[in-house]
Image (spheres, helix red, strand yellow):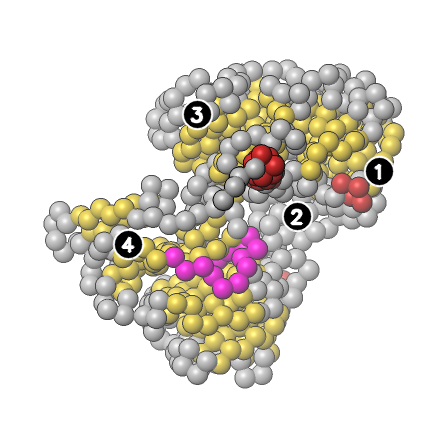
């Protein structure tokens, strides 16, 4: 074969083209010199368990079944041999679309069930395969049970769907949504009596107990409207064949007996004998194997399994196992005072850090879900879910997560529940000592408040929605000169709550008095202020509903301009604590969209497109030393070079 110079040049050209293409799609670690994007890799290569059970396979070997959840949702079932640590991974036969198990059940026939993303699914342990799945009405099971005939039942969020499946006959029935509300309902408990009636208990805005007749499809409310309470009702199946229920899970009285579709008020009910069943919510962890051994510990982060035998003193088997994961979903990306990039993920809750100077990385378990972060001085503050907690992290000190120790770092400061349960914004006030937390309220509530933390006095001041704007929650904030800050609201209620307001509002609050000085609904028909950012000369940039860009004159309290940028740029990035605006040098402000990055010119106040991202941008975001860092493709840390 004769290789000519022309052929060599052609081969080299092709190789260069391949390398450029590979760099453009984020393959490897090489920076794309054309579009300036850099893939720094998966931040936290770990999945979370969404239901774990100990059982046996067809050969009688002890196995552990774990529903795996990463940024894609509930993507697979993991089977671990509890003797060898060998694993098998079974991808779910439908797209998870970021949804995952909220309820699971191991049946009396040793089949493992769940129901999410509008799909009911069965895994046969003996067959080592998914043996049944079926599309259903929306969307995800909140509770599952097995009746006396072996039929599996599921009650779904958000509008109380009911489905049943008989493993013996292969019969599947989707009864649709049987009890609709004008809010998202959570049917967290379901049971069947010995007559074949199905009962489920729901919450959060107003509790209810439903008696469902499978023969007719009729759903009969048990509680009168005046008996419903904010929170979740509760029920269970007793060994006497009846179901017992109460209007609120946390109450000790107010029980009723449910049987054959009829309800009898009891008041007290002290002899509780639940029928044995292996089922529960996403935290289900059934530890006991049929032979008496048990799971002492299962750690997906360290990929370790510990099995003990209570009958044999000192028996302890430690196993290593492995599985594949696309990484946990990144909630936020920011910069620590020391010049490192950090962030946190949900499911599992993990902190990660990256030092651009040394390429050094770390990740470790953290307290709760870090929705939003802010720096003040040399400290970093974290607002998180659940409970609206506030943490103070000193990056210069060792990491210590035992809150019983005085040197706990990050340190737990307090929580804003119930007025702030799911934080969306932290604001560090210019006084250098005050942190403000905003977000939506506890489950079932409507209207969130504000939490003010004074670093000097170590005291908290709480403002409810009635002190700000009734039935709304603050979703975005920006500090202004002159001792005020601007807030933008959302009309969304707390999880499982009922929406009451019609449109979001901007408001101006005096920091010293905590009084609202001005408020106005400037965007009729929209739902929430996504983010706010200080611009030049007293102006404020804002995004509403991820599509509408506006400029607001905070001095004269008037709207300067408004543009629907959706047709040009698509939606902005979104998370529970969005970081859409990224302040940079020379008064430039960068804006993160799902498909790329734009920039606001400080003189013209117009927004111009900079670059298409090689992956969807899923969480913001911070500027550091000429680069914008963000979450790309949900689980990967990316950066864009702007200088």
Which quadrant would residue 99 be assigned to in this image? Answer: bottom right
Which stretch is magenta? 89-101
Residue carrying label 2: 493
The mark lying in front, picked from 2 and 3, is 3
Q: Is residue 267 visible?
A: no
Q: Work out whether residue 416 or residue 637 is closer to the camera in this orientation and state it.
A: 637
Please report the residue visible at 48 percent of the width from the left and 55 percent of the height from the top: 74
Please report the residue visible at 83 percent of the width from the left and 45 percent of the height from the top: 524
Q: Which mark is residue 563?
A: 1
Which quadrant would residue 503 be assigned to in this image? Answer: top right
The mark lying in front, picked from 2 and 4, is 4
* Mark pair 1, 4: CA separation: 57 Å
* Mark pair 2, 4: CA separation: 46 Å
Element type at marker 1? strand
The percent coordinates of residue 517 (x first, y second) are 79, 27
Residue carrying label 4: 86
Q: Which mark is residue 360?
A: 3
Of labels 2 and 1, earlier in sequence is 2
Q: Is residue 99 magenta?
A: yes
The percent coordinates of residue 141 (x first, y second) are 52, 63
Element type at marker 4? loop
Q: Are marks 1 and 4 in contact (CB under 8 Å)?
A: no
The percent coordinates of residue 247 (x first, y second) are 52, 61
């Amino acid at each position: 074969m004769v290789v000519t110079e022309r052929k060599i040049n052609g081969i080299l050209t092709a190789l260069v083209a391949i390398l450029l293409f590979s760099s453009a799609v984020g393959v490897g670690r090489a920076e794309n010199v054309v579009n300036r994007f850099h893939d720094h890799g998966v931040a936290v290569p770990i999945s979370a368990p969404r239901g774990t059970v100990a059982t046996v396979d067809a050969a009688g070997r002890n196995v552990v079944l774990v529903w795996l959840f990463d940024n894609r949702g509930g993507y697979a079932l993991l089977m671990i041999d509890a003797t060898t640590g060998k694993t098998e991974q079974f991808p779910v036969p439908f797209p998870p679309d970021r949804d995952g198990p909220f309820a699971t059940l191991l049946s009396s026939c040793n089949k493992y069930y769940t129901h999410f993303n509008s799909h009911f699914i069965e895994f046969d342990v003996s067959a080592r395969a998914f043996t049944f799945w079926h599309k259903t009405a929306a969307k995800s099971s909140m509770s599952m049970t097995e009746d006396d005939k072996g039929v599996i039942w599921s009650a779904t969020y958000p509008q109380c769907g009911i489905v049943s499946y008989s493993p013996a006959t292969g019969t599947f029935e989707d009864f649709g949504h049987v009890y609709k509300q004008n809010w998202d309902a959570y049917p967290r408990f379901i049971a069947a009596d010995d007559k074949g009636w199905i009962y489920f208990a729901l919450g959060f805005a107003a509790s209810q107990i439903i008696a469902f007749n499978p023969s007719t499809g009729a759903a009969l409310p048990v509680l009168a409207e005046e008996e419903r309470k904010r929170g979740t009702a509760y029920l269970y199946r007793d060994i006497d064949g009846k179901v017992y229920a109460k209007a609120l899970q946390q109450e000790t009285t107010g029980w009723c007996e449910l049987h054959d579709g009829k309800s009898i008020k009891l008041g007290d009910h002290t002899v509780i004998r639940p029928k044995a069943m292996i089922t529960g919510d996403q935290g289900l962890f059934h530890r006991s194997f049929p032979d008496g051994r048990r799971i002492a510990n299962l750690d997906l982060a360290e990929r370790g399994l510990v099995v003990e035998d209570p009958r044999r003193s000192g028996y302890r088997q430690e196993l290593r196992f492995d599985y594949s994961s696309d990484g946990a979903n990144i909630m936020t990306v920011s910069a620590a005072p020391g010049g490192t990039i950090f962030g946190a993920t949900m499911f599992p809750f993990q902190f990660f850090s990256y030092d651009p100077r040394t390429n050094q990385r770390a990740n470790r378990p953290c307290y709760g879900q870090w929705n939003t972060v802010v720096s003040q001085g040399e400290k970093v503050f974290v607002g998180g879910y659940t409970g609206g907690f506030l943490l103070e992290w000193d990056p210069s000190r060792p990491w210590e997560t035992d809150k019983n120790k005085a040197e706990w770092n990050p340190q737990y400061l307090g929580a804003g529940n119930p007025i702030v349960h799911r934080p969306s914004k932290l604001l560090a006030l210019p006084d250098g000592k005050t942190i403000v937390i905003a977000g939506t309220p506890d489950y079932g509530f409507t209207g969130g408040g504000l939490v003010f933390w004074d670093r000097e006095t170590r005291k908290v001041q709480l403002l409810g929605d009635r002190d700000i704007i009734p039935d709304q929650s603050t979703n975005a904030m920006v500090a202004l000169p002159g001792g005020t800050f601007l807030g933008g609201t959302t009309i969304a209620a707390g999880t499982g709550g009922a929406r009451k307001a019609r449109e979001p509002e901007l408001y101006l609050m005096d920091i010293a008095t905590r009084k609202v000085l001005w408020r106005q609904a400037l965007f009729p028909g929209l739902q929430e202020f996504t983010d706010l950012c200080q611009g030049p000369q007293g102006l404020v940039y804002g995004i509403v509903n991820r599509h509408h860009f506006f400029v607001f004159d905070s001095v004269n309290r008037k709207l300067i301009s408004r543009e629907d940028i959706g047709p040009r740029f698509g939606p902005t990035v979104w998370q529970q604590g969005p970081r859409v605006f990224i302040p940079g040098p020379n008064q430039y402000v960068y804006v993160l969209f799902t498909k790329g990055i734009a920039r606001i010119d400080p003189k013209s106040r117009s927004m111009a497109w900079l670059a298409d991202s090689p992956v969807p941008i899923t969480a913001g975001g911070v500027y550091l030393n000429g680069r914008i860092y963000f979450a790309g493709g949900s689980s990967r840390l990316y950066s864009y070079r702007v200088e």
